[in-house]
Amino acid sequence: MKDFDLIVIGAGPGGYVAAIKAAKLGMKTAIVENIKVGGTCLNRGCIPAKAMIHAAGLYKEISHEGEIIGVYADNVRFDYGKIVEYKQDTSDELVKGVEALLEGNGVTRIDGTGKILPDKNVCVKDAEGNETVYSAENVLLATGSVPSTIPVPGIDLPGVLTSDGVFQLTEMPESLVIIGGGVIGVEFATVFADLGAKVTIVEALPRILQNMDKEISQNLKMILKKADVDIHTGAMVKRIEETEDGLTVFYEEKDKELSATGQYVICAAGRKPYTEGLFGEGVDIAMDGPHIDTDETKAFETNVKGVYAIGDIVPGIKLAHMASAQGIYCVEKMAARRNGDDCQPDINLKAIPACVYTDPEIAQVGMTEADAKEQGIDVKVGKFIMSANGKSLITHEERGFIKVVAKADTDEILGAQMMCARATDMISEFVTAIANEKTVQQLLKAVRPHPTYNEGITEALEDTIGESLHTIPRRRR
């Protein structure tokens, strides 16, 4: 008899969700974790970052925007130590919740570092170095990722931080140079610019948020510049040096060597799969570059039967909710196989939203207009500028928009891009639509309340078919 039906290595959003789902499906399940449950997301990523964004945004709103509506606050200040404490308390509370969920669902917690051995055995080394071997019918690898760095001189200097290091700062930085204009980079830029730091972004690609809709990138660049963030794109970092004024990043932009100096440098160059020490002797897991190679049609099974992998260690989208969705998909298929079934999980892994928690928020799902053009798909595009939305005017939101991409012949919704208040919440309406192959007309059957940001969705949908009531027609019908 095996010790467990399933052993999960890694208790991040992919691992712990998979473990709970497996237990609910009647599988005897264990989960191995060497730090804290919740993984990067709860402890060193999504949650602490969003807590800091909330605190910084609240300070900005009170100190700079209240007088616009006649609310005056004198001597507004912040305590960075308290912000750090609030961030940590938020993470700790969620970690406790996950621990309670694992215990309440009967998942066995095994503290230590897991390593997969032949025959689906798992060796766990605890903090004292003691090793215990457990056996399982199935093993799910969900060890996540760690921050990437760039191979340039000076990257190891004191004061050059990864995202993990930023969360350890106990005093407010006066100035920062952020290497990387992706999601991590622009979110940190938002936090520290709102708190009054001098921020510079150096991005190697032609624009910030390169993987998102071009108009989103352009709008965000203007908004960040308005907040005194200095942005350099198409800029290749050459070296980092200690100078009299701090840490200086030297970079090449348009064939010229330029530099930017800050008290700290944040390397926000993305993340890489964490598989160090994961494979024991005699285990030959097929790899796809730095990622573990899996077959999605077989529930993310590796080349070793009964061994699966999900989340940041497999190719594809690197998001917490993607890892959770993969975990559910994997375990549902796994449980069905054990019961001799061949059912298809309900969850749709093709409609995965991406969110950025800047001000305004950014969210998109499915195809952009550029994606459709590249794939030769004829589409129609509807757009609503949110400056005409009543709720946006009430709350003095920055210029934003909602865009809808639909198939030209059937009006099936293929994608949506949003840059406005509550975009990260509202995008789910389009996720549901794409996952269920809904059309513009089907979404227009819903009446959205007034005054809300959601009304902009109706307007964008209507504009897709040329019928927006609160947009001046682009052409006379």
Image (cartoon, rainbow, N blue to C red):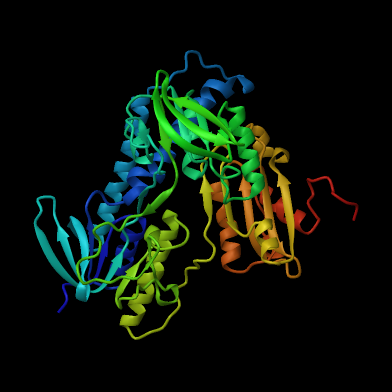
Quadrant occupied by the C terminus: bottom right
Query: In this rendering, would 325 be left or right of 126?
Result: right
Residue lying furthest bottom = 340
Please state the horizontal and vertical placement of residue 166, each as a whole percent of the image: 37, 35
- Residue 239 lies, with reference to residue 401, above or below; the image says above
Query: In this rendering, would 323 be left or right of 278?
Result: right
- Residue 461 lies, with reference to residue 25, above or below; the image says above
Task: State which quadrant residue 52 falls in.
Answer: top left
The foreground one among 81 and 168 is 168
Tell me, yes or no, if residue 445 can be seen here. Answer: no
Query: In this rendering, would 38 be left or right of 264?
Result: left
- Residue 162 lies, with reference to residue 317, above or below; the image says above
The foreground one among 40 and 428 is 40
The foreground one among 412 and 135 is 135
Please state the horizontal and vertical placement of residue 375, each as a whole percent of the image: 67, 66
Please state the horizontal and vertical placement of residue 408, each as a whole percent of the image: 75, 66
Please state the horizontal and vertical placement of residue 28, each as a whole percent of the image: 22, 71
Q: Residue at x 51, y 44 (%)?
A: 182
Q: Residue at x 38, y 70 (%)?
A: 330
